[in-house]
Amino acid sequence: MIVIDTEVVSKSFIQMQLGYCREIAASSGGKYYPIADLTSWAVHDIVIQELERELLSSLQALREEDDIKRGNKNGTGKESGNKSAI
C-alpha cells in the first residue's frame, strides 16, 4: 500500500495537522510519503516499485499453489519426502 500525505500546512497560519496518513501507512504495512517530498518522477518510481512487488508476490503465490497441486506440500519448488542413500 502506498500512502501519499497531501495534508500541507506550511503556508497556513494554523499549524494543525490531523496526521492520519502516517498512522494508516503504519497500520496497513504500507509506505508513507509526504507530498512535499515528492516529484512526478518519484511518484512514478514508487508506483513501479509497488507494481513489481505485487507481481513478485503473485508469482510466488502461483508457485506455491502449483507445488501443492503436484503434491509438494512444503512450497519450496523441490520434491518433498525423505530419500535415503543406499
Image (tube, rainbow, N blue to C red):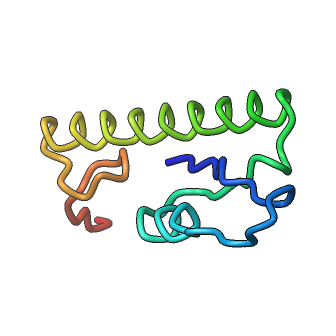
Pick the front one: 44 or 17: 17
Q: Residue at position x 66%, y 54% from top?
A: 7
Q: Is residue 11 above or below residue 17?
A: above
Residue occupying the far front of the picture: 13
Q: Residue 49: which quarter of the image?
A: top right
Is residue 64 depicted above or below 21 in this figure? above
**Residue appearing at x 29%, y 52% in the figure:** 75
Please state, as top left, top right, bottom left or bottom right, where the C terminus lies in the image: bottom left
Question: In the figure, 9 relative to 58: above or below?
Answer: below
Residue at 64 percent of width and 52 percent of height: 5
Q: What percent of the width, then of the height, locates residue 50?
A: 59, 38
11 in relation to 13, above or below: above
Q: Quadrant of residue 66?
A: top left
Taking the image as shown, residue 49 lies to the left or right of residue 66, namely right
Give how far across and how far down residue 70 sits, in percent.
Answer: 16, 36
Q: Residue at x 40, y 41 (%)?
A: 60
Residue 16, x across and y down, in percent: 67, 72
Q: How many marks?
A: 0
72 displayed left or right of 34: left
Q: Name the one closer to the observer, 4 or 65.
A: 4
Q: Nearer the viewer, residue 54 or 39?
A: 39
Residue closer to the observer: 38 or 47:
38
